[in-house]
Amino acid sequence: MLGDALSLSLGYNATLVTLGATLLGAAAGMAGTFLYLRKNALISDAISHATLPGLGIAFLIAVAFGWDGRQLAILLGGSALSAALGLYFVNWLTRETRLTQDTAIGCILSVSFAFGVVLFTIIQVLPAGRKAGLESFLLGSTAGMLYSDALLILVLSIITALVLVVFLRPIKLVTFDASYSETLGISVRRVDFIILTLTLAVTVLGMKIVGLILIVALLIIPAVSARFWSEKTDIILITSTAFGALSGYIGSAISAVSAGLPTGPIIVLCAFGFFLISFLFAPKRGVLAVALKHYQFQKTVHLTQGLLSLALRQSIYEPKTRRLLQRFGYIRADGVVTEVGKSLAAKTLLNEKRWSYWQETLRESDQFDGQVVFSLMDIETKLTQDQILLIDQGLAARKGKKL
Amino acid sequence: MMSGIALVSDKGVLLNAAADDRNAPFTIRGLTVSYGQVPAVYSIDFTAPAGSLIGILGPNGAGKSTLLKAAMGIVPVVSGQVSFFGKPLKEARYQVAYVPQRASVDWDFPATVYDVVLMGLYPILGLLRRVSKADKAKVAESLAKVGMQDFADRQIGQLSGGQQQRVFLARALTQRADVFLLDEPFSGVDAATETAIISVLKILQLEGKTVIAVHHDLSTVSTYFDHLFLLNRKAVAYGSVTKVFTKDNLVTAYGGKLGAAQLDAIGL
């Protein structure tokens, strides 16, 4: 069954939903990347909650004019307007008052939501309101998604992608170094406007599928997950887009075959799955990789210091060092140094002497600047044969002098 | 465009007083900037002659960084004018390069050294022009000038503080500007970086560029700069280092924050 859904052969409606969710996920992944890199992710929460009053008011106005209040274009139009208003107030509060941005977001978010809920309650009692189904925008509902809805999302995703490609340079510059970009004549406010407009568009269109409460997750989680995999903005952007699209695709397919499971939450849980995989298994920034690297570093420190103590015939008090030396067969259980241990200890001592001579005399200003403790590196892998020869000659001459 | 050169002739003279500075590389007239009601800098007049290397010195909170930021349009001004070669910043952007404080950005940002230095070329690259071989050569050249040519592919988060500062300087160099404004370029960097940066600045000066740097180390003032601007919210003194770098001026600028021991240490 799931295979049918994934291969889009579950009928017209399910196919539309899956396509729409995939494209929405992609658009959210793209817009979210820069929202996250700009350290402005929380603003999407204010945007999404600020859609609510607009949704209610748009419905009331439509009904007052005698139109069908459930028309998506009217509802989304109203949501977009009120979200833009909310966004404006957040920025205004941050700029003109002493409130910090997180406080401003908290205010606008909760007040909008409260206002929206009051409106919804009023609508519920109206004769036209009972069937309005506005609450489906809270958590998303893909039942009865129309061809026009899917088309709208398709167009939005394409526009998002185009805008990001065209403005990639200024967006990157502003997210990395806002004040410098201002000096180059690239307006921070204008670039932020682009990022936030894209976010707003994704939020408003995502209300239908994922719901306004959960759309934030689709903007943030794919971007955060993608950050684990790369140190390059472009690759993070592509990865985040892929994570968002896959979450939408798999999530909507699962919800299509299991009657009753809501689409939005399933999509968000899929995104969380990608996050979990990234968080645990990403090769450099993932927690397992970091823990492994730390363990290996600790091991190197203990072994180097242990071997050095052996070479200098000092006692080793640290139990962990003794344990490691023993495990690697450098000392026996009774503390006697093995042959392997002896030769490695001599090698470690030589490494140490060479490094310290190099640091004192030959080191060029900032080679390996501030990065490393020299003793922990094998000098033969870091310097050239010629350099080492020079060091050894220096060491020999020094020894000669002492004698 | 470069008619301000006539002012170079006698560097020892106070140039901001009567000289015709309409075409000077960098001029500030009556600049006041405030955060809230308290002025961060007040009524500053300042003219930088072409080919000068100027240090801006003053205690913490004197408004040194604010002055540069206001000049570059990063913070709004309450009153006053800033001009470069007689033009407002808007019309002279290509001639001015700014080096922000190292700590002003998040170095965990996903980018390489090359990516950051390339940003200096964004104005001429525009939105979509491909990066050409000539552009890449410019980036490489700037990196070589600050001794970072081997680090182009390095992730910026893996650089030491001094290396980060040099990357910022390289980014400004790619702009090929005529005026350079640097905010605390020597703050928290290693000795090798400090030497590298000051020699780059001196070469820029020899090429006739105008360099203005916010500085805080009294002991290096006379070796690094030829002009000195002492600031403590208001201008305290400005002119050649030999004339301005005096005990009286320093005490006026720093007030009680400067001990007799410190003055002795720098031989004043």
Image (tube, helix red, strand yellow):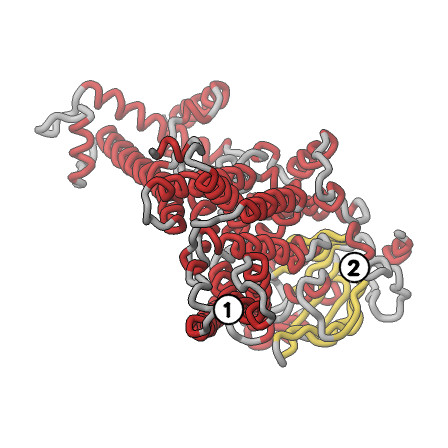
- Against A161, is A194 above or below? below
The disc label shown at residue A195, or none: none
Q: Is disc 2 in contact with disc 1, using a CB cutoff of under 8 Å?
A: no
Q: Quadrant of residue A189?
A: bottom right
Q: Nearer the viewer, residue A371 or A270?
A: A270
Task: Give me the residue at 44% from left, 41% from top.
Answer: A14
Q: Is residue A339 visible?
A: yes
Helix or strand or loop: what does disc 2 sit on?
A: helix
What is the quadrant of the C terminus of chain A in the image? Answer: top left
Seen in the image, is A354 located left or right of residue A169? Answer: left
Q: Quadrant of residue B80?
A: bottom right
Residue, disc 2: B89
The disc label shown at residue A56, or none: 1
Seen in the image, is B21 located left or right of residue A138? Answer: right
Helix or strand or loop: what does disc 1 sit on?
A: helix
What residue type is disc 1 on?
Gly
- Against A41, is A122 above or below? below
Across and down, in percent, residue B146 comes to 64, 40
Q: Cα distance, mark 2 to mark 1?
A: 47 Å
Task: Give me the residue at 89% from left, 66% from top.
Answer: B19
Q: Are marks 2 and 1 on the same chain?
A: no
Furthest residue toward bottom? B37
What is the quadrant of the N terminus of chain A in the image? Answer: top left
Task: Give me the residue at 25% from left, 20% from top.
Answer: A343
Question: Which mark is nearer the camera, 2 or 1?
Answer: 1
Q: Is residue B260 visible?
A: no
Across and down, in percent, residue A379 comes to 41, 26
Q: Chain of mark 1?
A: A
Across and down, in percent, residue A297 comes to 32, 36
Across and down, in percent, residue B139 comes to 68, 37
Q: Chain of mark 2?
A: B
Q: Nearer the viewer, residue A323 or A205?
A: A205
